[in-house]
Image (spheres, grey):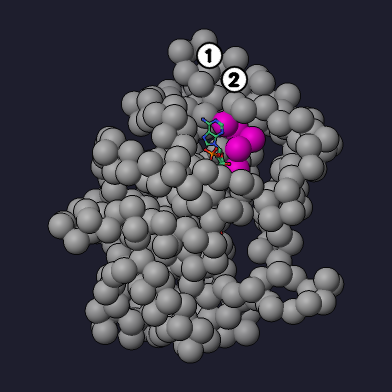
Amino acid sequence: MKKVTLGRSGLEVSRIAYGTGPLGGGMGHFDEAAATASVRHALDVGINLFDTGRVYGRAEELLGKTLGAELRRDRDSIVIATKCGLRPSGSDNPGDPGITRDSSPAAIRSDLETSLSTLGLDHVDILQIHWPDPMVPLAEVSGTLAELRDEGKIRHIGVSNFTAQQLAEFDAGAAVAETSQPGFSMLNRGPAQDDLPYCAQHDVGVLVYGPLAHGLLSGAGYDPSRVFGEFDWRRNHPFFQPETMTTNQQVVGRLEAFAAERGNTVAQLAIAWTLAQPGVHVAILGTSKVAHIDAALPADDIELSEADLAEIDAILADAIAIPFFQVEDM
Ligand SMILES: NC(=O)c1ccc[n+]([C@@H]2O[C@H](COP(=O)([O-])OP(=O)(O)OC[C@H]3O[C@@H](n4cnc5c(N)ncnc54)[C@H](OP(=O)(O)O)[C@@H]3O)[C@@H](O)[C@H]2O)c1
């Protein structure tokens, strides 16, 4: 597995990271034994960056348990990135969003302490603010993370779902964002306009989530009338609404043909395309299955030429663009 320096964090990480989202149950049912085997397998094939989050159900617990022995044996060989600053709203009112943003110092500290004890660690390598909280100035949030770094509880400071403007506001505080985690894929190219250029200019390490458009670019094929389970966060996602899905799956079909001509799958093409975009260092593959890790690995060796990228752009011009999907919409 090829390694890359994750921008100004200086961390050396695999270009394909393991995303524990599916281990939280937020993408439908998963088999616990198969999922933990996939975590183990990821490590065995050379993946050293594992992305998780406080609000991903049992994901931190399963990750900590599965990698526990390895983390105790050689802590610095594995990069654990978790996220803080979101909590279930706890309201019974069905009109309320299920998730509340909270980047107050107390919430960040409490989330981190819970993550550390759940993971069984005394520090995490990257702590990311999951979503910007409009109630707390971002320069203040930066200050809280700077304190936690000084205390040795986190090694590096990250953010997620931040625009370029929000990154600049954060960077004006006591610490700068060393990493950024936007949602980005062939079907969600919005961050390429301003956010990725900001990161490239300031050497921010970029690890993107959703490189397979949360499954749409996996080659699995979705029935446009499919109704996702009650706890599957894709239930309300604009990608998966019938009209958009129908059009975009036709585009995926053309990408599939393009990939097949070169001996690849569309999932491999989608990951390679993501990694080829200026400013992107890492693609986080969300999975709970050994076979899906193996299916993605050849992406690491795909080189896309300028002509390939132009041909892909022409295919993507027919896709329906998706607006920035906010956490409250889930
Ligand atoms: N910062 C944020 O706000 C945020 C938001 C969402 C996600 N994330 C992070 O980013 C990670 C990746 O995002 P994502 O989960 O949306 O990623 P993704 O890689 O775009 O899609 C993951 C989905 O694709 C499926 N899949 C993967 N390979 C497949 C294959 N070969 N064939 C069929 N299906 C396949 C997975 O199911 P299987 O489990 O069956 O493999 C899963 O349902 C998450 O796990 C999480 O760590 C962050």
Is 130 located above or below residue 228 in the figure? below
Question: What percent of the width, then of the height, locates residue 323?
Answer: 72, 52
User: Where does label 1 land, which residue?
Assistant: 260
Q: Is residue 97 left or right of residue 291?
A: right
Badge 1: how crowded within 10 Å, few (<14), some, or many (20+)? Answer: few
Residue 113 x, y percent position in the rendering: 39, 79
Residue 7: quarter of image: bottom left
Magenta-highlighted stretch: main secondary structure? Answer: loop
- Residue at the spot of label 2: 256
Judge by depth and name the residue closer to the eye, 260 or 222. Answer: 222
Q: Residue at x 32, y 44 (%)?
A: 40
Q: Nearer the viewer, residue 155 or 67?
A: 67
- Whether 147 is among the magenta residues is no
- Direction from residue 165 to residue 207 in the image, left or right: left
**Which residue does the image show at 53% across and 81% down from the upper left?**
103
- Marks 1/2 in contact by CB < 8 Å: the verdict is yes
Kindly identify the residue that appears in the image at 39 percent across and 69 percent down.
Answer: 118
- Residue at 25 percent across and 79 percent down: it is 152
- The quadrant in which residue 165 appears is bottom right
Q: Is residue 175 visible?
A: yes
Ligand 1 quadrant assignment = top right
- The residue nearer to you, when weighing 280 against 88, is 88
Q: Magenta span covers which residues? A: 214-218
Q: Position of residue 308 (x, y in %)?
A: 50, 21
Q: Amino acid at mark 1?
A: Ala
Circle 1 — which element? helix
